[in-house]
Amino acid sequence: MSAAFHLAARYVLRHRIQSALLAGALGLVFALPLCLRVLIEHAQQELRARAAATPQIVGTRGSALDLMMTALYFKRENLTPLPFDALAELRHTKSASAIPLHLRYQAQGAPIVGTELEYFTFRGLHLAAGKQLSRLGDCVLGASVAKQRNLQPGGHVFSSPEQAFDMAGVYPLKMHISGVLAPNGTPDDEAIFVDLKTTWLIEGRSHGHDDLKKDDSVILKKEDGNIVGNAAVRMFNEVTDANLTSFHFHGDIATYPISAVIVLPNDAKAEALLAGQFARSKDKQLIRPRDEMESLLAQLVRLEGFATSALLLTATAALFVTALVFALSFRLRQREFATLEDVGVSRLSLITVKVLEILFVGVAAIGFGLLLLLLASEVAPHLLRWAL
Amino acid sequence: MSDLSGLNVTDLHFAYSGEGFCVQVPRLDVSGGKALALAGPSGAGKSTLLRLFTGLLTPNAGKICLGSTQIDLLNHEQRRAFRLKHIGLVFQDFALLDYLTVTENILLPHQFRDGIADTPVRLRMQDLTERLHIDQYVNKRVSLLSQGERQRVAVARALVHEPQFVFADEPTASLDPARGRIVVDMLLEDARKRGACLVMVTHDPNLLPMFDQTVRMEDFATA
């Protein structure tokens, strides 16, 4: 046995590149379905957890999936916005708490999430550094955003314009970083949180500029008590202690846009009543993320079934190819085995040599497959975050 | 313990199926410690006869006895076991495994028979490689050696386990006359010292006087 082991080991080591390639191919083919399972298992767990933690979401009628992805994963789908007074209506029912979300802009590739302080309590988000939002123009960074971009409290981050060459469009706002959240392994790590009013400020519904009453040089005309400024009026792109009071809103705030409202019903009865109430609404919808997520995951599992079938077929084909490779290899080495037979090596020993060679490659393939599996479980959270 | 001295062949007849060529040996005896040279032109059946003696071929008729063992009566596995234990073979094409080193090739049959080589075997291997002038290559892969060096590795492999029967198929074919002489001297000395039986196929008429017996294949083979 030791001679057969030695001979097989020497052959595999002497042809290590070919053996490693074969083992690698085998390991890859057999690990792929398992890796896919690991990734999907992780995705299911994470998606379910996020959905289960969010009882209800209200948005404008349309794609329930888009609404869910916007409210849970800040996907900035092109949802028709809700008027801000929809939030007041929900709160007026007194049967649920409501947290507004507004998503339209981004900064350095991360979504800017306009919300209220209640959101942090609801999601269990804690500050790792700095302090909470306290002033218009403040922002709190998710842990990953801060880490990847090396940002810290006291620093600044600019909102990105929607279109680079739109001179009349939205101007970037220099936001003051008031705090950084502790990592919690959810999409909150990847977001920049601001007060709802700050998103409206970015959107241009609010602005701050030089006081026209104090400086005549920036006045174009005065008529009927209205003062019209000229082009010299400085518009502020940053909120500071000095200019904070100059910021003001135009129009009716009740009509200002929000993307969605996270609804936290007081009890099961309130949940059912709200669902019934919104079922009759023509312009709004209320979804249960848990239900939407389950139907999405059902699709995912079906897709996984197809993918696994295809991968298993590939694995079977790979198994046949490997068998062929070994058969051809042994055939090419017929002279070598005949020599061993001539010397007097028993048939059992020769079979042992061949089996051991296959085993060595098999063990290497399993090792490689396990490595891939380990890698898959390591990268699964990042991959999911990237995919979403 | 069975007697392992001498080769006795009686009324041997062998023919390849479908071919007219056949080998017939009415009687041949080689005592222990003696050496027999098989001479003759190419295709005369020297290698065939050697394969018959070692049990690699089975005669159509007759008896081949290696000591008290009639090898033609053994089954394949028994013959393999017998060869591994009692026979040293030097093949015409060396039959070495290219991916093994000189040491590994020499000890291969021993390892399949007795497991890991112990000190006496290693000392014997060292002695053989020194005498065959291949001691500086022991850790080299045989694929890196010249034909002559490979031939000498094959000789060392045949002798390292001190077999009672040594069959060598033109072991000097790839060697220059001086080295060929060293190899034949060593095979003869080794066989005589241990009382082993040596049968060697050779084309070289200069070597024939060194053997105790010489058989010309023209006397055996018929077309």
Image: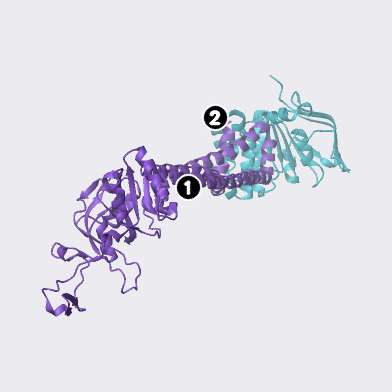
Chain colours: A purple, B cyan
Q: Nearer the viewer, residue A308 or A113?
A: A113
x and y, in percent, of residue A29 in the image: 55, 46
Q: Nearer the viewer, residue A343 or A60?
A: A60
Q: Nearer the viewer, residue A352 or A185?
A: A185
Q: Is residue A197 left or right of residue A377?
A: left
Eye-nearest disc, 2 or 1: 1
Label 1 element class: helix
Distance in Å between CA atoms under marks 2 and 1 = 74 Å
Residue B120 shows which numbered tag? 2
Q: Residues within 10 Å of mark 2 (few under 14, many from 20)?
A: few
Q: Amino acid at mark 2?
A: Pro
Which chain is disc 1 placed on?
Answer: A
Splitting the image into 4 quarters, where does residue A355 fall?
Answer: top right
**At x 19% / y 67%, what residue is drawn?**
A208
Label 2 element class: helix
x and y, in percent, of residue A79 in the image: 40, 58
Splitting the image into 4 quarters, where does residue B120 fall?
Answer: top right
Which chain is disc 2 placed on?
Answer: B
Query: Which residue is under mark 1?
Result: A296
